[in-house]
Amino acid sequence: MAFIWRKLLQLVIVLLCVTFFSFFMLTLLPGNLADTLCGIGCTQEQRDQKVEELRLNDPVYIRYADWLGNVARGDFGRSGRTQQDISEALTERIPVTAELVIYSQLLALGIAIPIAVVAARRAGGVFDRVSTTTAFGFLAAPPFVVAPVLVLIFAVNLKWFPATGYTPFLENPLDNLRTFFLPALTLALAEMAVYMRLLRTDLISTLQEDYITMAKAKGIPPKRILWKHAFRPSTFSLVTVAGLNMGRLIGGAFVVEVIFSLNGLGKYIVDGILGRDYLAVQAGVVVVAFAYVLINFGVDLLYAVLDPRIRHARALA
Amino acid sequence: MSRKDLTGSAAGRDPNAPLLDVRDIKTHFRTERGTVRAVDGVSFTLQRGRTLGVVGESGSGKSVLSKSIMGLLPRRNVLREGQVLYEGLDVSVLDENQMRNIWGAEMSMVFQDPMTSLNPVMKIGKQIKESLYLHLNMSKDDAHDTAVALLSSVNIPEPEQRLEEYPHQLSGGMRQRVVIAIALACGPKLLFADEPTTALDVTVQAQILNLLQQQQHERHMAMILVTHDLGVVAGRTDDIAVMYAGRVVETAPTATLFTAMRHPYTEALMASIPKLTDPSHTRLEAIGGRPPDLINPPAGCKFAPRCKYAQDRCLQEDPPLMDAGEPGHSFRCFYPVGTDAGAQALANNAAAGRSASGVPVTLAASGSH
Amino acid sequence: MPEHSPEHPGNQAPGSNYFPSGDFLESPNLATELTQIADVDAYNLEALHNLDPDQVPEDAVKKRLGWTFWIAAAWIFLIVALALLAPLLEKLGMPDPTQPVCTSRDCSLQPPLSGYGLMGTDKLRRDIFARVIWGARVSILVGVAAVIFGIFFGSIIGIIAGFFKGKVQTVLMGAMDVLLAFPALLLAMSIVTFLDDKSVKTIVLAIGIVAIPPVARLVRASTLVFAEREFVLAARTLGASNGRVITKEILPNAVLPIVSFGIIGVAVAIVAEGALAFLGLSIPPPDPTWGSMINEGRATLETAPWVTLMPCLVLFLTVLSLNLAGDRLREYFDIREGAL
Ligand SMILES: Nc1ncnc2c1ncn2[C@@H]1O[C@H](COP(=O)(O)OP(=O)(O)OP(=O)(O)O)[C@@H](O)[C@H]1O
Ligand SMILES: [Mg+2]
């Protein structure tokens, strides 16, 4: 229990740091915030109203505290650009990004795990070398390079998957998975390469452990040794990195969202940045940081499931 | 007990053959630096229910020998030669699929370090029951009862509870008992115990050794007890093979070896056992020098560079295995301990102040024997 | 990568390095690739800290760079040479990258090797090969300059943090962690947008700032290691000033891990510039950069895929070569060996 409280406390501290920092950075910007927010052709009256509205005459920490209070009540304010309620916009966009990230991670892990296991079983063999080299290639291919190639192959030539369009999951799950396939695969390829290399390395070193030889000496078949004995102890770094990546992708999938015109959280932040929509960007950053910290928390809990030693160490703490 | 059909279980087996007959096995590792001759021509036989002690310094090839006999070494970059006749059946030519019916069921192994030989993320119960399901086709309830019985037979208190625990919750001694329970689970006929007590506290060592001995008698099981400490095997084994640089340099019934050793290396090992009668601060006579490089072993006798008895001949000619006269006693030495040739060699070296290989020899050292 | 708690260099039990660090401020929030690489190097350095010199075999097999390294190096050399020589090539007859190669309509979207240059033409009838070469100038310049910027400031922060430890370290590394908490590319984007200037200088600054935290982490780790070593302790007992110890003893030793890290860093920076350009936040048109070329070509992906694929291919090969070369060099100058 103490462990969970400590984690929650850290969660709050990180959120405070990140939000304050981003808040503070806005005050450092060149030019007057009120002018920028008010836009071109803004009358002095409108401008004063803006200053009043955003309390720009107050010191930054007071404004921050105010903003924090509003956010705690779920009120992120209104977008300066579209006048849309920001909370509303976020509730529309978060599911899109969440699905994209989860879909791509499932694809990446689903491809990486079997390949890594087969490669590790015969480390140095032909399959191992081919898959390791291919993975190295994927690492060098960023989303904006992969996407056009995938679109060319799967959408233009084979016509298996659409290049754009989005169907909500609840409307038509199959269509949803089909329309999401190319964006998810674009994200998944590089991740897959990372996961594959990681799991392969850890598996190879686990397979040299005494307890694996011991399992072999018990007469356990190789398949069972791989999956029941070696796999779980080899997944710790995989879980860490996959968790970190999921957190990273919540805010980092925007290139893919832009390419495939998905109205996700990342694209919202990008549009916000390009349109100088400060409150929107600020809200987006909060969500990204919150999601990241939350996922990190989940990863920590997952360790305890994977490793009984951690479970017991924590139970004692 | 319904045992799965064992490949070649009936076929090729000879009830009159010794349980294990190892003939000139060699195990070489191909590495980037060259070929490591970890085991280089070892032969012995082991009868049902008997115990063989394998003794040697670290790096002499004891673990590789056990793993090689069991066929546990990976195939890649490993050269394996010679025959391993198990109940008359040559198991060295079987592939892993065939060996799997023998592993755990008929031969099993207790590893050196109980800290690393249990799977850290698997409950102890599961690690024991796994082989019961696999080899004995037991039902859930039977496996549970058998596992509890096994744990209590290796003197683990509250066995029911332990089944649900993970290895890290047990002490080293307890873990080694679990490893032994796992090894004994399917009633093997042959147990390899590879330095089963090296990683444990001195107080626990004797308990584990006694446990192994007791289980061996109860189950009429043959055992190969590997150790680097002659003190451990004294009184617990029927025969002893002393290994040096991947070879057996002397083998004899235990009593004979202790009273009438022939090889200078055995003598040196003997001198390194602490004796109760020694005054408490007597410095143990450690063996000077290092074990030879297994990639480029010296010509002639492999022990010569560290031997007090070494003569010129030892540096050129590799001594073959020679019969000591008594049954079951043989050794590889031209100037054996306790013979006139040996005494003469030692006296010559003492006079010269050094052996032919340059080991300093003093009169006092030679006089002590 | 697992979090290797840098407070306790390498003294974890083997197999326990996946233990969560227990501190979110320590974890590479939204870790960039750079951070991951830097953390691995930092971990190796920590392992070095505990390394017993006797364990390093004297007769270890001689390492080789291998032919893949040389192919990668050749490609990098080729691209760099072409980029440097672009003005000269233009004098020798390479078309202007911003002007149509002809006036008639029918020379737009010509496929590669069809009489309109090595890589064909784009929609605005410009020579793709020339654009790729001029684009390489931007990519390489930004990549190298941003990494140098990151290494310069990252090293200063890392060395100060690692050398003085205590509160200085807490504050500096805490700031780095907050910086890492923002998605790197979004941060770079914001910098370019808010400075409202799409010049090479701004882009270098934006990507360079993002590169500071991982470098600082790596350098701090090596400083921690070297600050404890005998020759540094000896220098200090002899009365050398802090500044002298840092510049003469620690800095030279921290360089090696940074150099091989820097090569992979250039690859990451090139990708970052590509992404910015793809989003329209790099050198404005008509000047070519790889990212904007890929983006522009997408409109005609169905009819003229080469417009996108050519810059994709060149970018991919360049990034792959840099990764490969950096990776091989890291192995070749294995930190443990290089430092001993
Ligand atoms: N897989 C391998 N590849 C290369 N060499 C090996 C391999 N396994 C063992 N060796 C070498 O074989 C020799 C014998 O090793 P082995 O483990 O059998 O020694 P040991 O007698 O069991 O020593 P210890 O008492 O330390 O356990 C050693 O020199 C070792 O370096
Ligand atoms: Mg051993």
Image (cartoon, coloured by chain):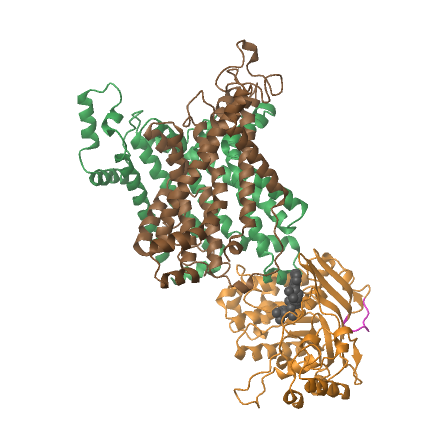
Chain colours: A green, B orange, C brown
In the image, residue C215 above or below residue B336:
above
- In terms of depth relative to the viewer, which is nearer, B266 or B161? B266
Res C80 seen here:
yes
In the image, residue B166 above or below residue B277:
above
Q: Residue at x 49, y 16 (%)?
A: C99
- In terms of depth relative to the viewer, which is nearer, A210 or A310? A210
* Quadrant of the picture in which ligand 1 is shown: bottom right
Q: Residue at x 21, y 27 (%)?
A: A50
Q: Residue at x 64, y 52 (%)?
A: A223
Q: Quadrant of the C terminus of chain B?
A: bottom right
- For the record, the magenta segment spans B13-21
In the image, residue A29 lies at what x, y percent? Answer: 28, 33
In the image, residue C53 above or below residue C294:
below
Q: Is residue A12 magenta?
A: no
In the image, residue C106 lies at what x, y percent? Answer: 57, 10
Q: Is residue B17 magenta?
A: yes
Q: Relative to B268, is A30 on the left or the right?
A: left
